[in-house]
Image (cartoon, rainbow, N blue to C red):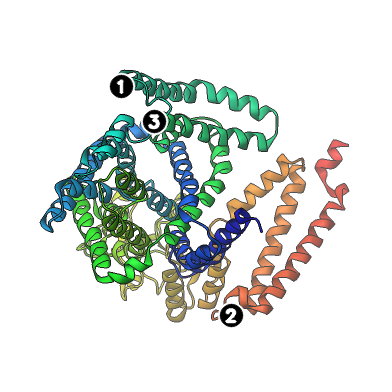
Amino acid sequence: MDTLLLQAAIYLGAGVIAVPIAQRLGLGSVLGYLLAGVAIAPILDWVGSDPESVQHFAEFGVVMMLFLVGLELQPRLLWDLRMRLFGLGGLQVALTTAAVALFCLTIGLDWRLAIALGLIFALSSTAIVLQTLGEKGWLRTEGGQSAFSVLLFQDIAVIPMLALMPLLAMPGGESVVADAAAHGPGDTPFSHLPAWAQGLVTLGVVGAIVLGGRYLTRPAFRIIARTGLHELFFSAALFLVIGIAVLMTAVGLSPALGTFLAGVLLAESEYRHELVSDLEPFKGLLLGVFFITVGAGMEFDLLAGNPGLIIGLTVALIGVKGLILLGLAFAFRMKGRARWLFTFALAQSGEFGFVLLAFAGGVDVIPADIAGIAGLIVALSMMATPLIMIVFERWVSPRVRRPASPEREEDTIEEEAPVIIAGMGRFGQIVQRLLVMDGYKPVVLDNSAEHIDGLRKFGIQVYYGNAMRPGLLEAAGIARAKLLVVCTDSRDRAVELVHHVKQRYPHVYVIARAASREHVYQLRAAGVDLAIREMFGSSLEAAQRSLVVLGESEARARRKTEAFARHDEESLQQLFEVWDADTDVFDNDAYIDKARSRVVSLAEIMAEDIGNPDDDPDHREDL
């Protein structure tokens, strides 16, 4: 059997099985890949597969990820990050290195070894952190941008760290040090050149990437796009990333840094979205394999022999880095949630730690026994990151999210009106504006004091308070009101409010904003008179315009849209009759059967409409 095919089947199969399970348990895809690697480690030993050889290939996923991140960052935004990039990133690396080195010195390690370990543990996982921040939608937040700045600085700092390692060689490794000093951190095609010539070559390559990314790639992609061959465009994108990585490696620089720079230069290109869509799946696959190799490469024999020591050192590393990060977050005046996201996201070690460990071992900086323990600490801290982020998301974030005005008392309502609006977001504002334009003056309630203060600057009267609090609705005149419009963002609070009002004031007509079909069913069960899906109307309008663009007449497109809306409303009622609040719709056979029958009936209605073109006045005019 072909060994390569067997390895591919093992790695891909492990990811396909483990990741959905991890996602279902709320652990995230990264931890799923890591656990998959741990699970298949015995199988890889049995078939004679070396995870390290696959890991070197899969590390290209990190390179591609930084290219895609660069595509999302415009040069102006990168310039805005300069203070965080060098100030925040530089301080984080320096302080963490110093803290780890000081600890190593106190336990009797040589100062050169202490500095080397400090540099290794100062790095964080670019792959895991950016993957997690991207999945959660946190990358563009203040905390996410600060974390990204530090990660980018760390990736840049890997180059001087590699150059420094041979100078930290332990006594007895003089021959290795001399050889490493002669060739630098890696033997490149230009290593034989004098230092000044190597510098010129390096500057030339970086300049070529900058100029090519700015002036040559757009015309090249424009020519390729004209061929209409999607696979050719994908090949060109892949060639661009691989070619830049090869050039940067040839001059001894980080390929990740080069591809990131190219991505930034293409951030304003008209082909940016197509590049992202083409390379995103390939990047995800390589990163998944990379995480699997990290899990499979863990030395469990060493861990079993020293579990307390290794786990204790891992927890200590996370704690020390966390304290340093938190201190920097305060020093750079990050606010609330951003401060803690920054701290929790970067508290682990990173994949470049494996690169530095391998190189440091090769130049006699770190002995093999200490390198094995350090490698386990790096791997365990990386595996702990998804769990740390779960703690942040579920327990820390809800508690540190700054309330608009925590001690502010609810407003005293001084008026009554036939209409009460609960919630003054985008949905509620439109309802309020139309009613006011027609001469009504509704009483508006909202529980975001900061939002209310902003609205009052525009002359909009909004009362601060929780509509569910006993007495607030009564003060607003709910007993004499004709209409309550529930526009709150919270699905559960909307259902609770509808149920409360319909139980005590059944004469009040209640219109509620619904987030989905399921939410419509919940609101109807609570007694709502009319539930309006927040995006249904705009989606219908988009669909109607799509039909016109595709060649339908205005009248026929409008008629089809109206028919669809009527059919959908009927479907909602029929599906509500078989809906069960205690059963997931995907497990409700009656619901599924009814939904399938409604799809068939809709197709029949649309077919009948198509078969009567003579009824279309626009069609008759065309004739």
- What residue is rendered at 34% in x and 51% in y? 350
* Residue at the disc numbered 1: 195
Q: Residues within 10 Å of mark 1 (few under 14, many from 20)?
A: few
Q: Which residue is mark 3?
A: 75
In the rendered structure, the answer to whether residue 357 lies left or right of residue 59 reads left
Marked residue nearer the N-terminal end (1 or 3) = 3
The residue indicated by pointer 2 is 580
Q: The C terminus is located in which quarter? A: top right
CB atoms at circles 1 and 2 under 8 Å apart?
no
Up the image or down, 310 lies above or below 70; here it is below
- Residue type beneath disc 1: Ala
Tell me the kind of residue under disc 2: Asp
Q: Is residue 308 above or below residue 286?
A: below
Which numbered disc, 1 or 2, marks the residue closer to the eye?
1
Question: How far, Cα to Cα, is label 1 from label 2?
Answer: 75 Å
Mark 2–mark 3 Cα distance, whole angstroms, equals 52 Å
Secondary structure beneath dot 3 equals helix
Compared to residue 188, the image places residue 500 above or below, namely below
Residue 146 at what x, y percent from top left?
30, 45
Q: Residues within 10 Å of mark 2 (few under 14, many from 20)?
A: some
Query: What residue sits 30% from the left and 35% below the top?
Result: 180
**Category of crowding for the residue at label 3, using alpha-carbon neighbours closer than 10 angstroms: few (below 14), some (14–19), many (at least 20):** some
448 or 483: which is nearer to us? 448
In the rendered image, residue 281, in percent from the top left (x then y), is placed at 56, 48
Would residue 586 be found to the left or right of residue 601 on screen?
Answer: left
